[in-house]
Amino acid sequence: MKIHEIIKNQGKSISFEFFPPKDLDGENRLVPVIKRLETLGPDFVSVTYGAGGSTGKNTVSLVERIQEGTSLTPMPHLTCIGQSYGDLKTILDHYKHLGIENVLALRGDLPQGTSDADFPEDCLTCAKDLVDLTATYQAFSIGVACYPEGHIEAPSLEKDLLFTKRKIDSGAHFAITQMFFENRFYYDFLNRAEKIGIHIPIIPGIMPILDIKRTGEFCRRCGTTIPNSLVARMEKASPEDAGLIGREFAIEQCADLIRQGVRCFHFYTMNQAETVIDILGSLSLGRQ
Ligand code: FAD
């Protein structure tokens, strides 16, 4: 089923994001995790795509297993930077053939050590171009990324939002946010988006922090703020206690979003089931 229709019909959604393991053994270990999370009745699950198409085959393989072996609705991520137009079309053709109905259209980031000179000549260089291509299929509900704190390369918050609007005007049906840990960024983004005429669902991306060092490094690279007080508490705690603090923080963050009327949640699972099960259980979200 198409994600924007699910949201329109239900007025809410729960979704989980996975990254494709490097090899078949890893995939075989992940499938039981996905099946465990399937019992919560998510409306869709998404599968990330490696930078520059580096792990594209693994994404396709996991998406096929979810589509064929579970009751879940998979949404593959697809990035365009560094990939030829023909390769992107081949992947979209394949997804259409498989009956996949949803795609998250992204620019992506080039793998380290590559430059513009390595691009194929017909490479698409921004997500909007991939939205344009994906929309020609008339087969997919198209999602795009958005950034409550602004994308790290954007010249300003205003310009970033305008570029986001262009993706929507090209045919995106919904957006999923970069992770954020201070809800004020998300509320402010919703207000600014509304003002410039963005009316599609903007689903908050929720990352329960389990490893503050790893998440902190990622957030520094992408310009996401983690409250200093949370960093300090997690750094002082044992790994086990730090996990509990991160989980508790995510529960509080979602509870605040719920109080403000938010009904759609996308969880970055880091391929682990238990944390998300606990969080949803505490919030009485998902099938209990
Ligand atoms: P775009 O929308 O193209 O924007 C990229 C930058 O270009 C922004 O700064 C924007 O302001 C600017 N821009 C856009 N249009 C123009 C223009 N016309 N002129 C000048 N500047 C412009 N990465 C992966 O590799 N694989 C994944 O699976 C993946 N999944 C993600 C899922 C979510 C929910 C999110 C939020 C991000 C994900 N990413 C993923 C990261 C994403 O690929 C990077 O953030 C990337 O740097 C930007 O991708 P985009 O699709 O937002 O690009």
Image: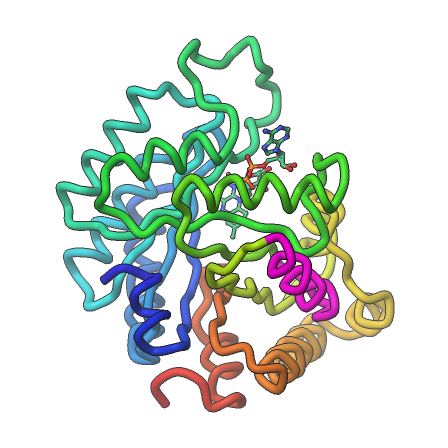
Locate the C terminus and report the quarter of the image it occupies: bottom left
Number of numbered discs: 0
Residue 229 position within the rendered picture, expressed as x and y whole percent measured from the top left: 86, 72
Locate the N terminus and report the quarter of the image it occupies: bottom left
Q: Is residue 163 left or right of residue 173?
A: right
Instruction: Give residue 6's quadrant in the image.
Output: bottom left
- 250 or 55: nearer the viewer: 250
Q: Residue at x 33, y 61 (%)?
A: 3
Q: Is residue 94 above or below residue 201?
A: above
Quick check: can you spot residue 21? Answer: no
Q: Residue at x 27, y 48 (%)?
A: 140
Q: Is residue 25 magenta?
A: no
Residue 63 position within the rendered picture, expressed as x and y whole percent measured from the top left: 27, 50
Quick check: can you spot residue 5? Answer: yes
Instruction: Give residue 37's quadrant in the image.
Output: bottom left
Which quarter of the rendered image does ligand 1 occupy? top right
- 210 or 256: nearer the viewer: 256
Q: Is residue 195 magenta?
A: yes
Q: Residue at x 47, y 46 (%)?
A: 168
Q: Main secondary structure of the magenta part?
A: helix
Residue 155 position within the rendered picture, expressed as x and y whole percent measured from the top left: 75, 35
Q: Is residue 110 left or right of residue 71?
A: right
- 74 or 159: nearer the viewer: 159
Write down the region rendered in magenta: 179-196
Q: How is the protein colored in the picture? A: rainbow
Q: Residue at x 23, y 28 (%)?
A: 90
Q: Is residue 97 above or below residue 30?
A: above
Residue 257 position within the rendered picture, expressed as x and y whole percent measured from the top left: 61, 78
